[in-house]
Image (cartoon, rainbow, N blue to C red):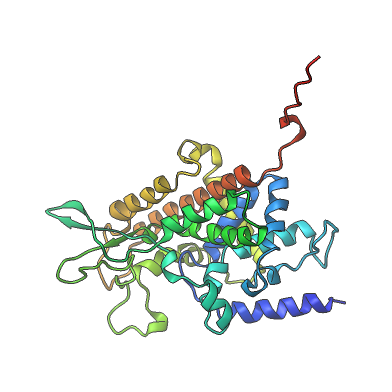
Amino acid sequence: MIKTSLLVSLLFIILISANIPVNAWDETGHKITGYIAWQQMRPDVRENVIKILLAAPEDAQLSTFFLGSRTNDAPYGSRSNEAQKRDFFMLVATWADMIRDRNFDTRYKKYNNGNWHYHDTLWTTKDGKVEYITTADETGHMMEKVAEFDKVIRSASATNTDKAIAVAWLMHLIGDMHQPLHTTGRVIFGEEDKGDQGGNLFSLTPKGTPRDKALNLHSFWDSIVKQTTPNTADACEADYLYPIAQSIMKANPYSSVEQRIANGQFQVWEKEGVELSVNDVYKGLTRYEMPSDDYKKNALKISQERLALAGYRLGNLFNEVFATPPPSAIIPPVVKP
């Protein structure tokens, strides 16, 4: 018989999932990044991060999503405790989008911050050349928040409660940072003087398309993996997401990107997105027309590499910060005769 607490949690997740807005990398993309990061993390780091996340404030409703045993007992229900922890970790990568749901008023008012999800470097083209635009207008706070949360997780004085929120935001924002259109906005003077909001104003469907069927450039890149590999069989998450994540890791092994990892160099990661946006994202597109098959193929390849990089980098960050020093790393004290 399913335990009452498990049933309540399942019902809660179903209710939440039905109301999650789709933003940034969609849920599929963020969970893939979480899966890859989990594979990159040391076993002790996994345990330490889960412990921190379970210390999240009650009103954040983070720990509610953990269905496994809070000890190392296994199995729990139909799946092992290790699998439950991995699923929970992957779900946390979507928490920063969950909190956009206004139906959960307390959580929404306390934790939601829409302008943390992007940092738009504005640019335009003039005489065939790219020009970057310096502006005093709001362009998003993603970069400063990533730096801030990085300091929190490294702080000896921060509580696990504080670190839980920082970890959840870092998992999401580092994913966002690797979606090129979360790093830029294209300016067309006289039409979009303040930028196109990361491609949100660049429609790929004809004028007059009903809103529920309309697609813009930003949404296209957010959902590229799901578009290419839809869950037509309505498979469970493990059967659907895990093989996709594994295929992305196989196509983009750590060894192939190791020289570009740039651990902890957030500005480098963000600049990569800017360059991709300028050089690739808008190339060959016409407003109100769907991209060509060649464009889609290239977009998928870029997105898969970005998801892999995000996962590897996130895993490395957590390994650096949350590792428990192994006995061999402990230097014995010098005993004077």
Q: Looking at the image, which residue is at 20% across and 68% down?
A: 193
Residue 327 horizontal/vertical position (percent): 77, 33
Location of residue 322 in the rendering, given as x and y in whole percent from the top left corner: 65, 47
Classify residue 117 as left or right of residue 43. left
The image shows residue 291 at horizontal and vertical percentages of 33, 65
Q: Quadrant of the N terminus?
A: bottom right
Image quadrant of residue 11? bottom right
Left or right: residue 129 compared with residue 262: left
**Which residue is at the front of the view, 181 or 281?**
181
Q: Is 129 in front, or is 163? A: 163
State the residue lying farthest toward the left: 127
Instruction: State the quadrant of the C terminus.
Output: top right
Q: From the viewer's perspective, is residue 86 above or below residue 6?
A: above
- Extreme top residue here? 337
Residue 143 lies in what quarter of the image?
A: bottom left
Residue 13 seen:
yes
Residue at the front extreme, as displayed: 337
> Does residue 20 appear anywhere in the picture?
no
Image-quadrant location for residue 180: bottom left
Q: Position of residue 53 (x, y in %)?
A: 67, 61
Number of numbered discs = 0
Nearest the camera: 216 or 101? 101
